Image (cartoon, rainbow, N blue to C red):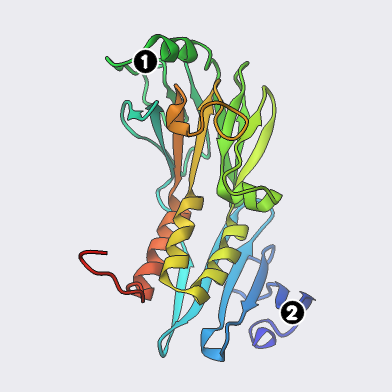
Amino acid sequence: EISTLFPQSARRTEENVFVCFADSENVNTHSTLIIITSSGSSQRCQSHFIILCDSVLLVSLFLFFFSGESAVSVPYQEPDNWCSVFYYELNNRVGDVFRADNRELSIIIDGFTDPNASGERFSLGLLSNVGRNSTIENTRRHIGRGVHLYYIGGEVFAECLSESSIFIQSRNANLMNGFHMQTVCKLTNGRNLKIFNNQQFAMQLNEAVHHGYEAVYELTKQCTIRISFVKGWGAEYHRQDVTSTPCWIEVHLHGPLQWLDNVLVKMGSPNTAIGSVS
């Protein structure tokens, strides 16, 4: 199958992974096509995802799988906004959602008071909350330059610009690093962390389609990243949940969420039964 698509360039790098240097007139000649095959218990459960990328940008991802008797193709598509950022104080959402469009692949969330709703900066200092206590007020004063988020080549990175630490919980990053899924990573000033990788996510999605609707839906948790300022939470802290921290943000990644939505629509509904009293 691979040699039919790219007869001169296909080569196997490891089991079920092929790398093809594209020579088709429909594909950028500087791009690399990676086709990964994963089989379930029967040929009909087989699925593939295809990654087309160059040295800078993730060009495209495709997921192919069988739904019943039909072969389904679900492409990854970049939405107009690559992420949304929601700001919280304890368990209360404060202010409007900030959306980062694809013209601004680098954004900063800081504690200052810039009144301009620009596409590259979200200033938390100007947001008001009548229920704010002294702990929240003091924490907000220490957010400072905050956190820098940037998206490149299908990967999302976070860099701590604040003089105080930031704390990040990303299931996708935890999986990449072999950490427990609930791990919270501490970043000090000048440190950065890869918090999402689309290719890693694609491999998980490729595997999840074999296990049904619920397994695919579970991946939505990887598309949400939580970051607290100054105060940490988790096993090493007395605050056990992010909603106990004074100031935190939740980042929703639109591209992966949209891809999951398109796959779930193609899959239909869950196979497990549910009743009104369950």
- With respect to residue 18, does 219 lie above or below? above
Residue 57 spot, x, y in % from top left: 61, 53
Front position in the image: 183 or 195: 183
Residue 235 appears left or right of 21 = left
Residue that carries the numbered disc 1 in the rendered image: 126
Q: How many labels does the image show?
A: 2
**Can you tell which mark lies on residue 10?**
2
Residue 78 in sight here: no
Residue drawn 52% across and 40% down? 105
Residue 62 spot, x, y in % from top left: 52, 70
Residue 166 spot, x, y in % from top left: 58, 26
Question: In which quadrant of the rendered view does residue 38 lie?
Answer: bottom right
The quadrant in which the C terminus is found is bottom left
Q: Name the kind of residue labelled 2 in the image.
A: Ala
Residue 198 spot, x, y in % from top left: 58, 56
The quadrant in which the N terminus is found is bottom right
- With respect to residue 139, does 46 lie above or below? below
Within 10 Å of the Cα at label 1, are there few (<14), some (14-19), or many (20+) other Cα atoms? Answer: few
- State which tag comes first along the sequence, 1 or 2: 2
Front position in the image: 70 or 141: 141
Residue 83 appears left or right of 235 = left
Question: In which quadrant of the rendered view does residue 115 lie?
Answer: top left
Marks 1 and 2, how far apart at CA: 55 Å
Q: Is mark 2 on a helix, strand or loop?
A: loop
Residue 14 appears left or right of 136 = right
Residue drawn 38% across and 75% down? 267
Residue drawn 56% across and 90% down? 43
Q: Name the kind of residue labelled 1 in the image.
A: Leu
- With respect to residue 192, does 77 lie above or below? below
Front position in the image: 124 or 116: 124
Nearer to us of marks 1 and 2 is 1
Q: Is mark 1 on a helix, strand or loop?
A: loop
